[in-house]
Every structure is written in C-alpha cells, then in structure tokens.
Amino acid sequence: MKSPVHRCRDVEQSRGQAWARTTLFQTEHRIPISKDVITSSSASAMWFIKDACGIICAIITWLLVLYAEFVVLFVMLLPSKNLTYSIVNGSLFNALAFLALASHLRAMCTDPGAVPKGNATKEYIESLQLKPGQVVYKCPKCCSIKPDRAHHCSVCKRCIRKMDHHCPWVNNCVGENNQKYFVLFTMYIALVSLHALFMVVFHFLYCFEDDWTKCSSFSPPATVILLILLCFEGLLFLIFTSVMFGTQVHSICTDETGIERLKGETGKWEKAPCWEAMKMAFGGPFSLTWCSPFSGMSCKKSSTELDTLPHGDIIEEDVIEIPLN
Ligand SMILES: [Zn+2]
Ligand SMILES: [Zn+2]
C-alpha cells in the first residue's frame, strides 16, 4: 500500500484532466467495483504460466507421484499373494493418485482470477460508469484497474483477485478461481502419502515374517532402498501438504488470504462468515462436488496474450478519482 502522501503526489501530477479531476482527499473510501465489470474474462484459451522454475517444480511433483505409483504397484502389490489386499489397496491408491494429479492440473491450468492487463484507460474507466467521488487504483506494473483484494504477482505478471500466494509446485498463483483445486491437491496428496506409508509398514512387517526373497520381485537390498525412499517421500509430503491444507482451510474460513495476513491488510473489508466463505471458495452448497476436481468453480480462462486490450491511452496516475460534478 502506498502512503497517503504518495497517493496525493500521484494525483497532483495529473491536474488538468477534466474526466478525472484530481482533488486531494483526506479520507479515502475505496468503493468496491463489481467483479464482473472489472474482469472481462475473455477467450476460452488455456491458462498456463511460462515460468521455467514453476514448470520444473510441476514436473518434479508428477515424477514423485509416478515413483510412488511404481513402488506401490511393482514392489508391494503385484508380488503380493493376497489378491483381495492387492485389489483393494491398488484401487484406493490409484484413485487417490488420479484425483491428486487431476487437482494439480486444474490448479495449474485455471486462471486464478487475473485482472485484464492494460485496462486502465480513459475509455474503459468511463465505461465503468462509476459514481462521483469513487476511487479506483491502477497497478503500475500491469496497467490494470485493481479491484479490491487483488495483488500483483511478479511471476504471473498480472494482478490476481484474492491472491493467496504463488505456488511453484502448481506453477500458478493460488487465487479466487483456483483455490478449491489447490486445497484438493494438498488434501489428496496428504491422503495418498498416508496410504502409501501404511502399505510400506505392512509390507515391512510381512517381509520380516516371511522370506525376503519371496516378498518382492526385486532383490532384497533394492526392495529395502525403494521402500525407504517411498517412506521418506511419503512422510515429507504428508507433513508438507497437511500443513498447507490446514493453512488454506484456515485462510478460507477467516476470509483472509496469505498475502493479506503477511501485509497486515486485515480488517479492510467485510469478512464473510466461515461457512459462507467455504461455499464461495468451493463453488456452491456442500455436496460431494466439493471433493471433485472436475466440477464447480467458474472455469473461465483468460490468457496473458489473448485478453482483449481496451483501446485508448493508459492513464498515468496510480490513484484515480472520479470527478464530483
Ligand atoms: Zn498488476
Ligand atoms: Zn503468480
């Protein structure tokens, strides 16, 4: 946030523009602008952030899940003599892993709530038909009109509505439109890790009782190394994603994003009650669809390149006040 002095200076610089008369305002009330007005989410193009670090992290995530899949199937379940045990655990593990990867894809390829770039133009602001005295903010980095609770992400190079944080593991920002998928991703990864850990413990117990050469199609040393690595991966992911899941649910419940907490911006908006906030984040009243990465949420996608840029001159100042007369 800028200091009032800075704001006044920005405003001072633009004296003389009739349409945005620049008055010095002592108390400033930022009136929320309708979300639909400010985000003209356009084309159905796919949302994907071209960030090398994020892409590598996302690939690593997939490889780690595939490694767990390999060990669970080829080291533990397929060599097992108990067919029922293998079918039940194999189905459960694969279902959880599939839901985790589907949630990851949805979190990565859903527009988190990007504000159209470069819409801070005279024509566009006039088209908003704002009330006299209303104040709007311009993001100096992407030249967009910044809605309430939006923050600029330097990786996505866009202002994101209700941005929580930029997560390299899903190579995307976590914002208003994809928070559900991120929460599901952390939940399913935690569950799949827990399930893998249980299976590893059972397999170790089984192998200790039985002959080591018969409990896996791999040599005993290779089996032990593969299982220990899976155990380590499972523990690490279980702890990390459980903490992340808890933090996200807490953020939704308190209607306060990670960035807002970090910047101490709390208390600047009317907070929604916990259950209402959950319904908003998960796209409707409680039902099984809350757990599905394939349903709910507006899947509007807009692309950095494909957003239709409004025509006209970009407004120079960061704070724009609509004239009173
Ligand atoms: Zn911005
Ligand atoms: Zn971002």
Image (cartoon, grey):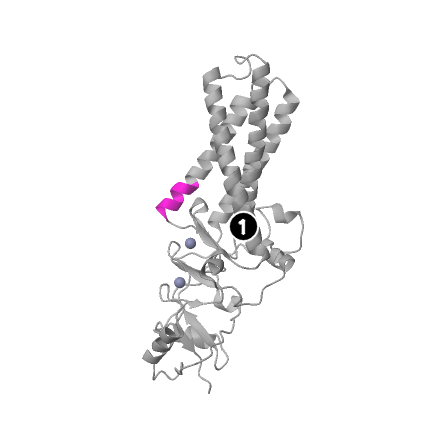
Q: Nearest the camera: 148 or 112?
A: 148
Q: Is residue 288 left or right of residue 235?
A: right
Q: Quadrant of residue 284?
A: bottom right
What SS does tag 1 mark? helix
The image shows a total of numbered marks equal to: 1
Residue 49, visible in the rendered structure: yes
Judged by its main secondary structure, the magenta piece is helix
Q: Where is residue 48 in the image (x, y as percent from the top left)?
A: 42, 50
Residue 181, visible in the rendered structure: no
Q: Where is residue 281 in the image (x, y as percent from the top left)?
A: 58, 55
Q: Give the range drawn in magenta.
A: 51-58
Q: Callout 1: few (<14), some (14-19), or many (20+) C-alpha neighbours within 10 Å?
A: some
Residue with the most extreme left position: 13
> Which residue is drawn at the image coordinates 66% and 23% (left, top)?
84
Q: Name the residue under label 1.
A: 247
- Is the N terminus in the top left, top right, bottom left or bottom right quadrant? bottom left
Residue with the most extreme front position: 264
Q: In this view, does 231 lie above or below 205?
A: below
Q: Nearest the camera: 115 or 265?
A: 265
Asked if residue 158 is among those painted magenta in the image, a careful observer would answer no
Q: Where is residue 228 in the image (x, y as percent from the top left)?
A: 48, 26
Type of amino acid at the residue the image marks with label 1: Thr
In which quadrant of this rendering is ligand 1 seen?
bottom left
* Residue labelled 1 has its Cβ within 8 Å of some atom of ligand 2: no
Q: Position of residue 172 (x, y in %)?
A: 44, 50
> Which residue is drawn at the image coordinates 43% and 78% (left, top)?
321
Q: In this view, does 9 lie above or below 280?
A: below
Asked if residue 55 is among those painted magenta in the image, a careful observer would answer yes
> Which residue is drawn at the image coordinates 58% and 58% (left, top)?
254
